[in-house]
Amino acid sequence: MSITVRYFAAVREQLGPSETLSCADTAAHTVGELRQWLIGRSPAHAAALDLGKGLRTACNQTLCNADQAVQDGDEVAFFPPVTGG
């Protein structure tokens, strides 16, 4: 399984634009599990993706909740509740 994780706004400033994870990297089955796994990946991920930050999430460019299932080839995005353009 391969999942592309994209970051926007302040999250992007902390972690960079994106990263690709393979099934060897994580066994996450939902967006919430993926976020939890990423938080444990490094101190930078923990700070940027902290559960108290109220980040919004999208799967394949559609807003979603933490219980959204992730599958091979999905793109998951994390961004602040308000972003500018």
Image (cartoon, rainbow, N blue to C red):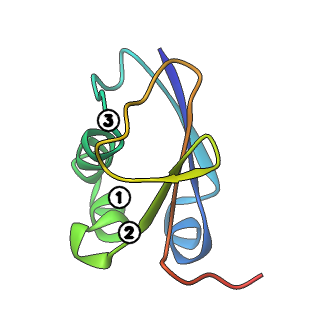
Q: Is residue 48 depicted above or below 74 in this figure?
A: below
Residue located at (45% from left, 66% from top): 56
Horizontal side of residue 13 vs 84, given as left or right: left
Residue type, numbered disc 3: Thr
Mark 2 lies on a secondary structure that is helix
Residue located at (37% from left, 31% from top): 69
Q: Position of residue 20 (x, y in %)?
A: 56, 32
Tag 1 residue? 45
Mark 1 lies on a secondary structure that is helix
Q: Is residue 57 depicted above or below 4 in this figure?
A: below
Contact flag, marks 3 and 1 (Cβ < 8 Å): no
Residue located at (26% from left, 68% from top): 50
Q: CA distance from mark 3 to mark 1?
A: 18 Å
Q: Is residue 62 depicted above or below 68 in this figure?
A: below
Tag 3 residue? 30
Contact flag, marks 1 and 2 (Cβ < 8 Å): yes
- Mark whose residue sits in front, 3 or 2: 3
Q: Position of residue 26 (x, y in %)?
A: 31, 26
Earlier in the chain: of badge 3 and badge 2, it is 3
Q: Position of residue 15 (x, y in %)?
A: 51, 60
Determine the image quadrant of residue 13. Answer: bottom right
Label at residue 48: 2
Mark 3 lies on a secondary structure that is loop
